[in-house]
Amino acid sequence: MKLLEERIRRDGRVLGTDILKVDTFLNHQIDPELMLAIGDEFAQLFADKQIDKILTVESSGIAPAVFAGLALHVPVVFARKNKSLTLPNGVWSADVYSFTKQVTNHMMIDQRFLKADEQVLLIDDFLANGQAVEGLLTIAQQAHAHVVAVGIVIEKSFQKGRQILNERGLQVESLARIKSLNSEKIEFMSS
Ligand code: G4P
Ligand code: NA
Ligand code: NA
């Protein structure tokens, strides 16, 4: 998505060799007009799919997921994260280890909001090592819901998440694909 790549080039900051900071429009301050365009782009990419609902993870997945939900006219459910060891009853849940942040979170969705046979689209802001999406897949499996595809705003193609999802046979659509962040340079995959 050209608009997004341009914005990443303009505002993205590289930390170390593998972190892209985009807190001016996605991860802290949010640009609603860009999110609207992102939602429309996802809706176009998944126009041929039957989708009942979108699943994402708090907090940074919510903005792009809500705009995709607006464009596709479906509700959006975000998994809540919980650091405590005990889980409430009546939730689907998964443990998710973050390589980036080196913490494990429980991710959970109230069973009222995800039912058997629902067709779900997963949306997230970043795809790095794939752990967040794996957590959502685990939750969907518990609920006997069907994951029809995965939509990602920014994929770091040099990390292993993309490959893991491909190996599972999932359709993954990423609006920006980053080939490398070496030498503080943002290099996109050629499309
Ligand atoms: P994974 O889900 O693909 O395995 O990613 P990982 O655990 O490594 O990432 C953990 C958190 O860090 C996620 O946010 C993810 O979106 C974010 N993240 C990963 N790589 C980058 C990056 O290069 N830049 C930015 N800005 N974020 C990155 P989270 O913990 O779920 O936090 P939240 O922001 O959604 O609350
Ligand atoms: Na995220
Ligand atoms: Na994040």
Image (cartoon, helix red, strand yellow):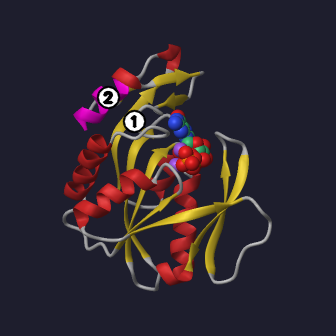
Instruction: Give the residue at x 45% y 79%.
Output: 145
Instruction: Give the residue at x 66% y 43%.
Output: 99
Give the camera-side residue of 14 and 37: 37
- Residue 141 rendering spot, x and y as whole percentages: 53, 76
Instruction: Give the residue at x 42% y 40%.
Output: 26
- Residue 133 rendering spot, x and y as whole percentages: 52, 57
Q: Is residue 165 magenta?
A: no
Residue 159 visible within the image:
no
Is residue 29 left or right of 67 when viewed as pictured? right
Mark 1 and mark 2 in contact? Answer it, CB < 8 Å. yes
In the rendered structure, which amino acid carries the disc numbered 1? Phe
Number of numbered tags placed on the structure image: 2
Q: Quadrant of residue 49?
A: bottom left
How would you rate the neighbour count of disc 1 (Cα within 10 Å): few for under 14, some for 14-19, many for 20 or more?
some
Mark 1 and mark 2: span between their CA atoms? 9 Å
* First-in-chain label (1 vs 2): 2
Q: Quadrant of residue 149?
A: bottom left
Q: Secondary structure at mark 2?
A: helix
In the rendered structure, which amino acid carries the disc numbered 2? Arg
Instruction: Give the residue at x 30% y 35%.
Output: 4
**Which residue is denoted by mark 1 in the rendering?**
25
Which portion, as a residue range, is magenta?
A: 1-9
Q: Farthest top residue?
A: 183
Q: Which mark is residue 7?
A: 2
Q: Which mark is residue 114?
A: none
Quadrant of the rendering where the N terminus is positioned: top left
Q: Secondary structure at mark 1?
A: loop
How would you rate the neighbour count of disc 2 (Cα within 10 Å): few for under 14, some for 14-19, many for 20 or more?
some
Give the camera-side residue of 79 and 184: 79
